[in-house]
Amino acid sequence: MWALLIRDLRLATRAGGGFGLSLAFFLIVAVLVPFGVGPKAATLALIAPGILWVGALLSCLLSLDRIFALDREDGSLDLLATSPIPLEGVVGIKALAHWLTTGLPLAAFTPVLGVLLNLPAAGFGPLVLSLLIGTPALSMIGAFGAALTVGLKRGGLLLSLLVLPLYVPSLIFGAEAARRGAEGQEILTPLLMQAGISLGTIALLPFAAAAAIRVNLR
Amino acid sequence: MSLWEYANPKKFMALSARVLPWVTGLAATTLLVGLVWGFFFTPDDFRQGSTVKIIYVHVPSAMMAINVWVMMLVASLIWLVRRHHVSALAAKAAAPIGMVMTLIALITGAVWGQPMWGTWWAWDPRLTSFLILFLFYLGYIALWQAIEDPDTAADLTSVLCLVGSVFALLSRYAVLFWNQGLHQGASLSLDREEHVADVFAWPLWVSMAGFGLLFLALVLLRTRTEIRARRLRALEARERMQ
Amino acid sequence: MTAEPLLSVAGVTVGRGGIAFLGQVSFDLRPGEALVLRGPNGVGKTTLLRTIAGLQPPMAGRIVMAEDGAAYAGHADGIKATLTVRENLLFWARIHGRSDVAPALAAMDLEALADRPAQNLSAGQKRRLGLARLLVTGRRLWLLDEPTVSLDTRSVGLFAQLARAHLRSGGAAVMATHIDLGLDEARILDVSQYRASAMAMPATDGFDEAFA
């Protein structure tokens, strides 16, 4: 199992692995927003938590189709499916690798963008915390979407269409926690809800995703 | 004789051919009675005036939007567990109907909301939930369209329907948490039975039954079409083999 | 010939998209035996191999194999271009709970290439890497789909040696190939005799059946 995780991390960080691409995308989204809504500090401070959450979510989406499609193309997925590792484990590890290479760096990078968008000082902690808790769910749901569309030639667009509605609960609780944090209110409730969603998806979706991969391989 | 007999395409075709004209007729009559009764033979609401009459379309379509998804969920489960093709095809046939119902509910809601709340759209929990439901229908239909092999498509869309149902419910509660909304205001909410006076309630019941029957007629018709298309595929494949 | 079969295929029908390609395929494979599948392109050899590998369910019949399963090598080798040859092999070895890749590198004459990124390999070298992978899985049953594609004569010889050694050590292999590897112990099975014709086969698609 660890071998798979290490390989996926290595592949993501080597040339052409796409690591850093989602971070760059996140940066660009955050830079474009003030051009769209105007440079007023008060306005930006108001929308910063939400914008950063949506931006992180979209950046996460960017690399989803790589999760299984590349392994499918070069035959690795067939070989993994016949290996001693259960496919559910493969899905879980791949989602974890995706999170380590996108969700985690995104969460770590967010404070910089928070400064750009004039996020109130009180909001930094809750925002990063909510991203840390919420992005694992994004990776896991994304892996499920990628598993559904792995058999398709150009599944990228469809993948977004399938995955984005599933992101709604995570986004709501995550952005809510970040917003409340920025306004100095208690954030425990949305964070707990979000943690519940993350844990639930991690517990259940590998089974659905593995079932989808089995269907797609046959 | 068990109910599963009708999961056999041949039996289903025979039964649906016999039932379909009756269901269609009944649906047309009930809809006509319900809508005409609702539109022309109920008094105007003392506060909302004649705009209230849109509920005879709005509420039944909203109800069906949810019921159709539930029906798809049940059909998907039956396909996954018992592998009855009719079930998978019925779910496929129902999805566009459900999507149109959702769209009708959203549009009539907007038309009603404009004079009542002074806005076409508000990010009210109920409205938002329906918009999300619409997106789920969209994704489900898109997945069906994208996959060539019918059994693969049936399997994957069924899994999506299952997972989607859980997330649709989650979204519903997340949205409530997110915004308390206009829709629940007692004077505006006619959704809950206790707020509807009998004069409005009876035609509403009839309309709801009419929408249900309309759905039944459409889904039978569309499932028959899907079965024929599937049969055609099988025949063509057989011909290629020779 | 008293050993338990490594693989037992009984009355198996395989197909795709509800259409049967091959029907009533039956054979047993004991340790030390090899079975070469022959037949024209598109007859269903790949589908049969994938079905045995467990990548798709058989439409009918039963497949029984040894506990640890089979090592499958299809058209694609499962090689990551940015990893070196050694890293690629090591990965598959670890997945199968092993860590020694030196014998596999030696067997397919890949030692000189071991630290080269796989993207710089030629098609034949990639194939050799793909075949070396079979060794690191440590599995006794090999399922090979056109294993000699894009190999030169010398590499084909290497592979024949590898296969022979595998059989001698109690392994078994099912392979679809058109080349004669000179494996004396190999039986040849022409799968076109099992070809499912629409007339002779009972409809295997449950859907079709219901209309019959």
Image (spheres, coloured by chain):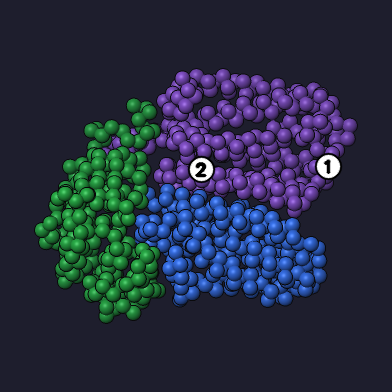
Chain colours: A blue, B purple, C green
**Residue B185 — which label?**
1
Element marked by disc 1: loop
The mark total stands at 2
Reading the chain from its start, which is encountered first: label 1 or label 2? Answer: 2
For the residues labelled 1 and 2, the Cα–Cα distance comes to: 37 Å
Chain of the residue under the numbered disc 2 shown in the image: B
Q: Residue at x 27, y 78 (%)?
A: C111
**Residue B158 — which label?**
2
Please indicate whether residue C198 sits to the left or right of residue A113 in the image.
left
Please indicate whether residue B126 sits to the left or right of residue B188 in the image.
left
Asked where in the image residue C125 lies, by quadrant, the reply is bottom left
Q: Residue furthest front?
A: C2
Horizontal and vertical percent for residue C179? 16, 60
Horizontal and vertical percent for residue C22? 25, 42
Q: Residue at x 72, y 58 (%)?
A: A190
Element marked by disc 2: helix
Horizontal and vertical percent for residue B169? 65, 45
Horizontal and vertical percent for residue B105? 69, 39
Asked where in the image residue B218 lies, by quadrant, the reply is top right
Q: Residues within 10 Å of mark 1 (few under 14, many from 20)?
A: few
Query: Of the residues shown, which amino acid type is indicated by label 1?
Result: Gly
Q: Residue at x 70, y 42 (%)?
A: B106
Please indicate whether residue B193 sits to the left or right of residue B237 in the image.
right
Q: Quadrant of the C terminus of chain B?
A: top left
Asked where in the image residue A197 lies, by quadrant, the reply is bottom right
Marks 1, 2: nearer the viewer: 2
Query: Of the residues shown, which amino acid type is indicated by label 2?
Result: Ser
